[in-house]
């Protein structure tokens, strides 16, 4: 497994991606004031590796006699420990071996307490590691076991219980039990280390268990230069591109480069593909090997293909990742119509950049399995927090989260394809595209996300066999994403579901049905479909379908009318005299805030054939067409950005506190200025009917 990215946080790491150490001690007794450690053992477990890969196992000379009753349990005698090192040096070696990894143990409160007592006696200070008590997790999952003994739990989980009652076997058993608990914890919504810590603390409070040692607050952000996250390719690209004919000689190309002061040119497309390119280095290499005769060579003879390209709307940090991962120095820049509109060089991008800029995205691209993806994905929380501290807007941060969600889904597709081909080398998948729907497609994902994806494909051969292959692919992608923290869609909107895995012809019929029937469920399905973004495979399949679907929707008056009515049918978060409408002390700012805004922007965009995906882009295009009352678009843009920011800040707080992130916020945690601004933003949401042509309710 690859080394853990330096920016990942234990708090937000999925348990299945966690590298952990299981620890156990043997002691002279159970009295914390008088007992001494006589053995300490620990095992290191890494994701994807079921058994320990390293261990620490040391006897300890306690400096006191071992009671016979204690020896009867673990078998350790005074003679066994006579030549062993004292506890101070053993613990020092243990903590050096442990490093920054979190500890797990069975009734670990006892182990931590006696370690603390031994350190106090030695006059040594320590920084307690992060810990999880496996027994407390078991109690949260299965409170009705006949007892809490480790043997009983192992029996429940079907784990062999041989060789017990020494520290090392007990540590190994604890590790195996913990690994078996992970999918069960995931099934009750406990995905991350912080969430497991929270339910463990809840059990400890109920049962009166031993407290865990206080842990210092760990830094969950990285020092980051936000420039490459704030800006897009269009902000720095060199334009327009210099395009030359395939028949041009190298002598002509050199003259053009000198005249225009550029270091590369693009070669017009040939019948085999898109544009090619030539750089100064390519020309020098030809002249070095061929001399003056090389000047007569044509561009077509030495051009480099294919030209790697990037969208002009892409973030700069993603362009850096492309250059770095492909070891190239030039990119072509494409507009929304896939036309070449600019050039981008490494010189444009790499000034004042650090490796932190590309770390997250690059690690996603090279992750070798689900466990590695989960470890990398957990770092997104740290990146989001760092960008927020840098003053990057919530709209930009959600766009970055969405961009990496798309990269994560793409990598999951690649890994799933590789697994299927390894199992069946003769497998032939059809041309297909994986689509991200909803907020991921709009570029507005926050940290509380679930899966919304679909597959479009060309039928090649037997339709049932084709669908069977794609069902397996979709299921593996869904399972992989769920294991790393992108949860299964509760509504089943995933490519593993037959309804969201269709051929091009089937999708055409499905979209037509949505537009003609105009049932409530059709509106909901169509809503997220119109936000779709292809992330893997034959992207043209998806783009062509979306364009045709938008054009058809613009002509369906009943569909547009029902969509507009649905936009206005939302429950506001402000009640009588401007008081909050709270549920469990919180407001759902998606349902009562951002959803009415992005739904209205989508509805108006469909009516006027606006192809933009993001809410902000749609609203700005609507403003250009003068389709809204004066000032309304600007107010909705401001409100939308502010509401996104409040949700993101709450999610970061909740993740720190071991709560699964959601779209709800707690108004009492806001300061006075933010509460005032929140009321203003929600008042603007109340004006959404004016955007879709419906009168505002009084």
Image (spheres, rainbow, N blue to C red):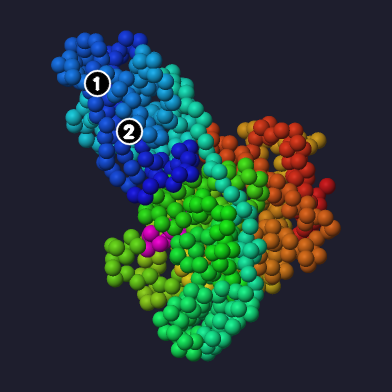
Nearer to the camera, 261 or 532: 261
Q: Is residue 281 magenta?
A: no
> Residue 337, can we see it?
no
Q: Position of residue 445 (x, y in %)?
A: 58, 52
Q: Is residue 118 above or below residue 475?
A: above
Residue 210 visible in image: yes
Q: Is residue 402 above or below residue 28?
A: below
What element does badge 1 sit on?
Answer: loop
Q: Which residue is mark 2?
A: 97
Q: Circle 1 is placed at which residue position?
A: 85
Q: Main secondary structure of the magenta part?
A: helix
SS for dot 2? helix
Which quadrant of the structure image shows residue 671?
A: top right
Q: Residue at x 59, y 83 (%)?
A: 255
Is 409 magenta? The answer is yes
Residue 536: % across, % down: 47, 65
Q: Mark 2 or 1 closer to N-term?
A: 1
CB contact under 8 Å: marks 2 and 1: no
Which of the two residues, 583 or 72, is positioned nearer the viewer here? 72
Point 27% across, 18% down: residue: 86
The residue at the point 47 percent across, 48 percent down is 377
Instruction: State the CA–CA distance, disc 2 to disc 1.
Output: 16 Å
Looking at the image, residue 46 sits to the left or right of residue 670; the answer is left
Residue 398, horizontal then vertical, whole percent: 60, 51
Could you tell whether 643 is left or right of 268 in the image? right
* Segment tinted magenta in the rendering: 408-417
Q: Name the quadrant containing residue 611.
A: bottom right
Please rate how many residues cluster around mark 2, counting C-alpha atoms within 10 Å: few if below 14, some from 14 to 19, many from 20.
Answer: some
């Amino acid at each position: 497994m690859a080394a853990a990215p330096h920016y990942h946080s234990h708090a937000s790491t999925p348990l299945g991606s966690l590298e952990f150490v299981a620890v156990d001690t043997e002691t002279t007794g159970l009295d914390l004031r008088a007992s001494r450690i006589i053995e300490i053992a620990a095992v290191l477990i890494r994701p994807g590796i079921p058994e320990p890969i390293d261990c620490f196992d040391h006897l300890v000379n306690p400096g006191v006699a071992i009671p016979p009753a204690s020896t009867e349990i673990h078998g350790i005698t005074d003679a066994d420990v006579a030549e062993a090192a004292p506890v101070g040096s053993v613990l020092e070696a243990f903590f050096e071996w442990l490093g920054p990894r979190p500890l797990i143990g069975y009734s670990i409160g006892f182990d931590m307490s006696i370690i603390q007592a031994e350190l106090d006696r030695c006059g040594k200070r320590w920084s307690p590691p992060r810990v999880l008590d496996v027994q407390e997790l078991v109690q949260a999952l299965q409170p009705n076991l006949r007892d809490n003994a480790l043997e009983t739990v192992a029996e429940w989980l079907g784990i062999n219980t041989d060789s017990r009652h020494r520290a090392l076997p007990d540590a190994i058993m604890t590790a195996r039990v913990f690994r078996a608990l992970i999918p069960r914890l995931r099934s009750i919504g406990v995905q991350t280390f912080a969430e497991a810590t929270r339910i463990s603390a809840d059990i400890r409070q109920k049962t009166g268990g031993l407290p865990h040692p206080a842990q210092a607050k760990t830094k969950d952000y990285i020092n980051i230069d936000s420039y490459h996250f704030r800006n897009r390719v269009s902000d720095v690209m060199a334009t327009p591109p210099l395009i030359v004919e395939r028949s041009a000689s190298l002598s002509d190309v050199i003259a053009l480069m000198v005249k225009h002061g550029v270091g590369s040119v693009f070669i017009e497309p040939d019948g085999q593909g898109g544009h090619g390119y030539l750089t100064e280095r390519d020309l020098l290499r030809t002249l070095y090997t061929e001399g003056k005769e090389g000047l007569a060579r044509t561009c077509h003879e030495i051009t480099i293909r294919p030209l790697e390209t990037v969208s002009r709307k892409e973030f700069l940090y993603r362009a850096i990742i492309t250059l770095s991962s492909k070891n190239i120095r030039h990119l072509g820049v494409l507009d929304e119509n896939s036309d070449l509109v600019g050039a981008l060089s490494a010189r444009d991008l790499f000034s004042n950049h650090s490796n932190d800029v590309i770390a997250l995205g690059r690690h996603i691209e090279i992750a070798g399995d689900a466990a590695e993806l989960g470890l990398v994905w957990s770092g997104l929380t740290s990146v989001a927090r760092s960008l927020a501290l840098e003053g990057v807007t919530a709209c930009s941060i959600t766009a970055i989260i969405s961009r990496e969600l798309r990269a994560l889904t793409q990598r999951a597709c690649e890994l799933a394809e590789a697994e299927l081909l390894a199992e069946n080398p003769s497998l032939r998948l059809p041309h297909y595209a994986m689509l991200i729907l909803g907020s991921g497609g709009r570029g507005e994902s926050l940290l509380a996300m679930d899966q919304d994806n679909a597959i479009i494909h060309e039928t090649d051969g037997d339709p049932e066999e084709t669908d069977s292959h794609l069902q397996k692919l979709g299921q593996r992608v869904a399972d992989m994403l769920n294991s790393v923290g992108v949860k299964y869609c509760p509504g089943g909107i995933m490519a593993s579901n037959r309804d969201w895995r269709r051929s091009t012809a089937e999708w055409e019929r499905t979209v037509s049905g949505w537009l003609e029937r105009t049932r409530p469920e059709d509106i909901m399905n169509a809503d997220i479909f119109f936000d779709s973004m292809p992330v893997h495979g034959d992207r043209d399949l998806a783009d062509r379908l979306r364009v045709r679907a938008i054009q058809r929707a613009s002509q369906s008056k009943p569909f547009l009318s029902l969509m507009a009515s649905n936009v206005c049918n939302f429950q506001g978060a402000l009640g009588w005299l401007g008081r909050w409408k709270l549920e469990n002390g919180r407001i759902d700012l998606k349902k009562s805030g951002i959803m009415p805004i992005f739904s209205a922007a989508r509805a108006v965009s469909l009516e006027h054939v606006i192809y933009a995906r993001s809410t902000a882009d749609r609203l700005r295009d609507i403003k250009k067409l003068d389709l809204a009352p004066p000032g309304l678009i600007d107010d909705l843009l401001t409100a939308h950005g502010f509401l996104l920011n409040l949700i993101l800040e709450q999610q970061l707080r909740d993740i720190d506190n071991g709560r699964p992130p959601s779209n709800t916020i707690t108004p009492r945690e806001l300061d006075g200025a933010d509460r005032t601004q929140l009321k203003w933003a929600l008042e603007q949401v109340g004006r959404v009917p004016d955007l879709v042509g419906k009168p505002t309710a009084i």
